[in-house]
Amino acid sequence: MDLGIKGKKALVCASSKGLGFGCAESLAEAGVNLVLNARSEGQLELTADYIRKRYGVEVKAVAADITSDEGRFRVIEAVGAPDILVTNAGGPPPGSWEDWDRDDFIKALDANMLTPIALMKALIPSMIEKRWGRVVNITSASVKAPIPRLGLSNSSRSGLTGYVAGTSRQVARFGVTINNLLPGAHETDRIATLVSSVSQDRGVSEGEIRAEMQGSIPVGRFGTPQEFGAACAFLCSLHASFIVGQNILLDGGGVNATL
Ligand code: NAP
């Protein structure tokens, strides 16, 4: 399917690896020029080079912490006025509800709620001016069904979800759509960290934890960054202009719910 976005420009945050990379690659495949971001310059440059060579699109790489004011400033300056914004950042660390204090919550809110909100506030006005724009926020299945060890994620991403529910309906009339993609377990470094944390917590091997987690997903496996990226690219396409303010689960059926 021609996604109809060839030649457009996208900012994909936190995209040297994992789900952000999956989104960047699918957009590049659709002919979109990219600004990529991550903190570690080495991996980011490798990723940028791979995408440039494989898809022939323009790729700018900005090594910066997207959760800091200074990092966001540099990324926003480099991208100018993108047509597409994919927000993403590392997730909060796992732990237990008794352990988190105010500082832990502030960090999680900064990274997974206030950072995407700041990016939308900075970049949506130029999309409104152009009467076309797409925003996809990478959140988590934890918004639909809480993950006990990820209480900081459950909380901060719910705040972002509320913001998107209201804001998406105010900008839709200008051709700008905002939607959230909610990953369940995907095969990335993040899932490896979670598996290791649960394994230590329960004194069970990582292999057993992986098998248990995969067995609890109706498709019987973790998702891939490529599957995730394909859904993101569709939401960013010309064909998705009537999809507004939605929270789309990509979890292999893991959340057991009718709606
Ligand atoms: P990942 O494989 O660990 O990749 C994270 C990417 O983000 C890397 O490119 C990393 O590069 C970059 N990054 C992290 N923090 C950053 C920051 N502050 N500023 C800029 N770049 C940053 O993680 P993932 O699995 O793709 O997860 C992406 C998001 O989805 C996370 O918020 C995660 O919690 C959420 N999620 C993931 C899953 C899953 O199963 N994978 C499920 C639910 C939710 P640098 O380290 O070099 O910065």
Image: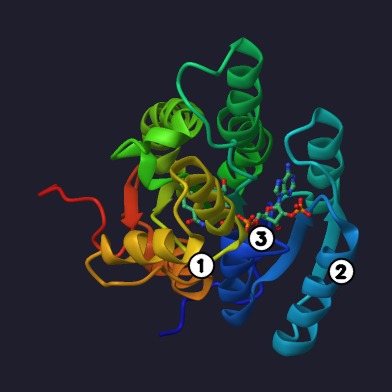
The residue tagged 2 is 45
User: Tag 3: residue type?
Assistant: Ala
Q: CA distance from mark 2 to mark 1?
A: 22 Å
Q: CA distance from mark 3 to mark 1?
A: 24 Å
Residue occupying image coordinates x 58% and y 31%: 117
**Within-10-Å neighbours for mark 2: few <14, some 14–19, many 20+:** many
Percent x, y of residue 148: 37, 34
Of all residues, the one furthest to the left in this rendering is 258
80 relative position to 185: left or right: right
Label 1, ligand 1: CB separation under 8 Å: yes
Residue visible at 73% across and 35% down? 67
Q: Which mark is residue 62?
A: none
Would residue 50 be seen by someone viewing this image from the given angle? yes
Identify which amino acid the numbered label 1 is placed on.
Answer: Glu
Residue topped by disc 1: 187
Residue 10 - label:
3
Amino acid carrying label 2: it is Glu
Number of numbered markers? 3
Q: Secondary structure at mark 1?
A: loop
- Element at label 2: helix
In this view, 105 is above or below 63: above
Instruction: Please state, as top left, top right, bottom left or bottom right, where the N terminus lies in the image.
Output: bottom left
Q: Image height check: is 145 above or below 160?
A: below
Q: Nearer the viewer, residue 31 or 46?
A: 46
Q: Earlier in the sequence, mark 2 or mark 1?
A: 2
Name the spot of residue 180 as percent of width and height, x first. Answer: 42, 47
